[in-house]
Amino acid sequence: MRPPYDITPKILKLISSISEKIGEVKANYLSKQSPQLRKQNRIKTIQSSLQIEGNALTEEQITALIENKRVIGPEKDVLEVLNAIKVYHELNTYKHYSEKDFLKAHSALMNGLIFNAGKYRSQSAGIVKGNNMEHVAPPFQNVPYLMKDLFEYLKDDRELTLIKSCVFHYEMEFIHPFIDGNGRMGRLWQTVILIKDYAIFEYLPFETLISGTQDEYYKSLSMSDKSGKSTPFIEYMLGVIEKSLTQLLHYNNRILKDNDRLEYFLNQGFREFTRKDYMNVFKDISSATASRDLKKGIELNLFGSTGQLNKTKYVVK
C-alpha cells in the first residue's frame, strides 16, 4: 500500500525545476565530475550528515581521516566518521529495494557505537525536544512489518523516484526502526534511492542544506506527523534537492578548468562548430571565457579555425 501523501502545486513546480536542472547536469559536463570535486562533495556530505547528529569534526579533519592520517578528537566522533567513510564508499553496492542491504548499511554506520547495530529496536522509542515528547514511535513489535511494507513500496515502479525517496525518508523517520542512527540512515537511504536513476546524487551533498536548515527539517517532520501525510516533508526535501542542484551548477562553472571543458566538448562528437555551439554546451560561461578556451584548443592543436570574428568556424582535427 502506498504511504499517504498529496501532490501539491508546490511539489509539481519543484519536480519540474529539479528535472530541468538534472537535464542541465546531463547535457553539460557535470555528469563527469573531477575526482577532486567528488572527494570534496563526499566530505561535505559526511560532515553535514554527522553534524546534524552533534558530531564536531571539521571538513579538514574528515579529509585527514579519508587520507588515513591521525586526527585528534572525541573518540566517538572519529569512529562515526570512519564508519560513514566506509558506508559512503560502498554506496553503489547497496540495492535501494533491499531490506537486507539497509540493515547491512546500518550495521556498518553504527558499528562500535551501539550494541545492536544492524538490528531493529526491541524497545519503545520516541523523540524528545526540551521537555516535550515530539514523537512517539510505533511499538517495536510492529517495526519489522512496517519496514517490510516500506520496502515493498520502494519496488513500485509507478512512483516517481524523486517522490519515493522523500516518502521513504519520512516514513522511516516516523517508524524510527533503530535505537540510534535513524536520522543518518534516512538521509543515506534517500541518496541510495536517488542514485538508482540519477548518478549525480552519489556526490551531491544535499545534507549540507539540511544541516543549515535543521529547524525547517524537524518542523516538516512534525507537520507531516500531525497531518498523517508526508506532504510537508516532501515539499521541504524537494526544495533542498532543488537548491543543492542550483549550487552544484554554479559551483562547477566556477572551478571547471578550460582543459576539462575542451575535453568534454570534443567528446560530444562535433566535427565543425562555432563559438556559439561551444557556449550552448557551457551555458554559464562568458563569451570571453569561451574565446580563451577556443584559443587554447587551437594552441593544443585540438582543432583549427577558418574565418574571422563572428564568422569563425572551428574544425576538429
Image (cartoon, rainbow, N blue to C red):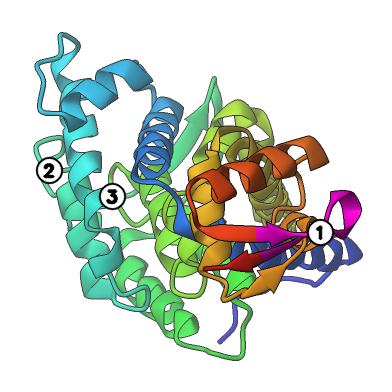
Q: Quick one: SS at disc 2? A: loop
| Disc 1 target residue | 307
* Three-letter code, disc 3: Tyr
Residue sitting nearer the eye, 6 or 12:
12
Relative placement, left or right, of 140 versus 233 is: left
Gap between marks 2 and 1, in whole Å?
A: 65 Å
Q: Quick one: SS at disc 1? A: loop
Q: Is residue 174 visible?
A: no
The numbered mark, 2 or 1, whose residue comes first in the sequence reads 2
Gap between marks 1 and 3, in whole Å?
A: 51 Å
Q: Is 99 covered by the magenta stretch?
A: no
| Disc 2 target residue | 111
Percent of width and height locating residue 109? 22, 46
Gap between marks 2 and 3, in whole Å?
A: 14 Å
- For label 1, count other residues whose C-alpha is less than 10 Å away and answer few (under 14), some (14-19) or many (20+): few
The numbered mark, 2 or 3, whose residue comes first in the sequence reads 3
* Three-letter code, disc 1: Gly
Q: Residue at x 70, y 53 (%)?
A: 282
